[in-house]
């Protein structure tokens, strides 16, 4: 597991995401403070940190579910601005998986998956459905295609949500604590799908506290606290020799569980 | 949840029925007393003629049927316009456009804070000559614009009740705002919108009687004309009241059925 930055003279893959001096406020509250982060194509970044440290806010800025006030964000070389056309185009390249799944409850699993390809890509219905079935196979629930989300377990719902994102063939995937709302026995089935995705070379940013998963897939670990990126390192260094005291404290708390 | 609505006990049902019967008897007594005091001459036998007459084996429809048809026409056209207007105004209020939001706000405040009768006269005497509208369309548009303001708030509340995560999921998939409304938000909001919107339809039927003041020949205008021709005010107004009831009660039942089914979900 080599980290590109540590290998001098290596040809680096192009930048997928670049965040420069990002600040964000909620009213008077300074939620993100001078965030700098570059994610290269195929890189897997795991973000951790205490609750309220700004992890969600940061990754939601990347597909502009949150608007930033200061600094610049580039996705695949395109800067995020107020231009809605650009934002919609960028969102089609960036998939997102939420803690609460956010499946469409009035649509079947299959319809959840085909909606965006049908509407946003104007894909013919038959193609969209075969694409959807392909991804349902990959998350191992093709037999649930005709059901409604509420008829599925939490783990199944989250796998549907991942498949729904993948149907848009995104180049980047963002995960915001995808297993935090799940019963413990369902966490593994979701992580397995994410590990598969990582193996295939998907560019990923995952906010998660599943440190076993982080050690398996992460190229880079990012620790956030109080709206700042406190530490960013390859997982070997991050877990064995964290530099900051705040990181040490956090890791000791989370790994003792 | 199930024990919130306990079945009423046998006793209270009987008490309720008794109360209701007493109330009806009281009303009848008051009417009869009043009629006796006035020396009123009941002519119920003439009322069927106001619906239809058969002359030489041919059915001739009476004024109450014509009035009913006009009332149904006016309310259905207005209802369609009300729904469209309500939806558009709700979407404007929720849009990013500042001028759109202010326009919607101005419309809502102006319409909801002035009497319908004033609006009707204003439209009839000021706007309809300008736009060349006849009385019928003035009536239809006034009603639609009035009820549309209330429908807009119903739509807005329904749309806002759809969880934020649904918008975010749609946005993150790259759906346009239009697709998000059409495929994700409105299909979920409609379940919340339908019961109060049907209620708004009921108001519309009731409010439609106001168009008689600009001499549109709706049910109520026909009734007024009949009364001035025949002086049968009791019979005619009771009959017309019953006709409005017959239109509205099925809708009221529909509302409670929908609400009941939603709660069951
Ligand atoms: N919409 C919002 N309005 C106001 N404050 C918010 C909003 N969203 C998040 N915050 C605040 O910003 C901080 C960071 O939130 P968040 O990014 O959700 O943290 P994390 O995901 O790390 O738990 C928290 O203190 C939270 O209360
Ligand atoms: Mg969070």
Image (cartoon, coloured by chain):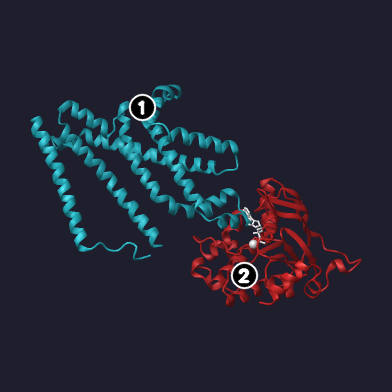
Chain colours: A red, B cyan
Q: Is residue A221 visible?
A: no
**Horizontal side, residue A231 vs residue A212: left or right:** right
Does the numbered disc 2 mark a residue whose Cβ is under 8 Å from ligand 2?
no
Host chain of mark 1: B
Assign a secondary structure to mark 1.
helix
Q: Residues within 10 Å of mark 2 (few under 14, many from 20)?
A: many
**Horizontal side, residue B12 vs residue A216: left or right:** left
**Label 1 – label 2 distance at C-alpha:** 63 Å
Q: Quadrant of the N terminus of chain B?
A: bottom left
**Horizontal side, residue A3 vs residue B65: left or right:** right
Judge whether A35 appears above or below B88 on screen: below
Residue B98 appears at what percent x and percent y?
Answer: 60, 38
Q: Which mark is residue A179?
A: 2
Q: Residues within 10 Å of mark 1 (few under 14, many from 20)?
A: some
Q: Which residue is mark 1?
A: B135
Q: Is residue A206 visible?
A: yes
């Amino acid at each position: 597991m080599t980290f590109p930055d540590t290998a001098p003279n290596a040809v680096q893959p192009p930048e997928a995401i670049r965040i420069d001096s990002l600040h964000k406020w909620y009213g008077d509250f300074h939620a993100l403070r001078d965030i700098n982060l570059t994610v290269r194509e195929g890189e897997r970044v795991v973000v951790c940190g205490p609750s309220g440290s700004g992890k969600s806010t940061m990754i939601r800025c990347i597909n502009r579910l949150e608007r930033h006030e200061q600094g610049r964000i580039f996705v695949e070389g395109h800067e995020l601005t107020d231009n809605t056309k650009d934002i919609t185009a960028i969102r089609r390249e960036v998939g997102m998986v939420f803690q609460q799944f956010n499946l469409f409850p009035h649509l079947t699993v299959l319809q959840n998956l085909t909606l965006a390809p049908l509407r946003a890509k104007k894909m013919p219905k038959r193609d969209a459905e075969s694409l959807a079935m392909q991804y349902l196979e990959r998350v191992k629930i093709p037999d649930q295609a005709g059901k409604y989300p509420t008829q599925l377990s939490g783990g199944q719902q989250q796998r549907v949500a991942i498949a729904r994102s993948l149907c848009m063939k995104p180049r980047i995937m963002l995960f915001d604590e995808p297993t935090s709302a799940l019963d413990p026995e369902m966490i593994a089935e979701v992580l397995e799908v994410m590990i598969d995705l990582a193996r295939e070379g998907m560019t990923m940013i995952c906010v998660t506290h599943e440190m076993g998963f982080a050690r398996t897939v992460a190229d880079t670990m990012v620790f956030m606290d109080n709206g700042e990126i406190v530490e960013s390192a390859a997982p070997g260094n991050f877990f064995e020799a964290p530099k900051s005291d705040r990181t040490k404290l956090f890791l000791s708390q989370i790994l003792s569980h | 949840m199930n024990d919130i609505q306990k079945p009423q006990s046998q006793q209270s049902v009987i008490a309720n029925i008794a109360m209701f019967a007493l109330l009806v008897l009281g009303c009848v007594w008051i009417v009869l007393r009043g009629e006796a005091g006035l020396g009123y001459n009941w002519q119920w036998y003439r009322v069927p003629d106001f619906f239809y007459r058969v002359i030489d084996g041919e059915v001739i429809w009476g004024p109450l049927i014509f009035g009913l048809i006009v009332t149904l026409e006016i309310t259905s056209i207005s209802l369609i316009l009300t729904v469209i207007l309500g939806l558009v105004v709700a979407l404007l209020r929720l849009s990013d456009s500042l001028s759109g939001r202010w326009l919607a706000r101005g419309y809502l405040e102006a319409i909801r804070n002035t009497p319908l009768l004033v609006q009707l006269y204003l439209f009839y005497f000021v706007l309809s000559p300008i736009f060349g509208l006849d009385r019928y369309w003035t009536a239809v548009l006034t009603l639609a614009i009035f009820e549309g303001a209330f429908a807009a708030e119903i739509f807005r509340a329904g749309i806002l009740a759809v969880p934020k995560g649904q918008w975010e999921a749609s946005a993150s998939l790259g759906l346009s705002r239009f697709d998000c409304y059409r495929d994700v938000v409105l299909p979920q909001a409609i379940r919340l919108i339908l019961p109060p919107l049907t209620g708004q339809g009921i108001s519309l039927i009731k409010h439609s009687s106001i168009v008689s003041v600009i001499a549109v020949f709706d049910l109520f205008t026909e009734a007024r004309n009949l009364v001035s021709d025949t002086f049968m005010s009791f019979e005619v107004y009771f009959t017309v009241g019953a006709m409005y009831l017959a239109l509205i009660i099925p809708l009221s039942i529909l509302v409670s059925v929908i609400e009941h089914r939603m709660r069951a979900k």
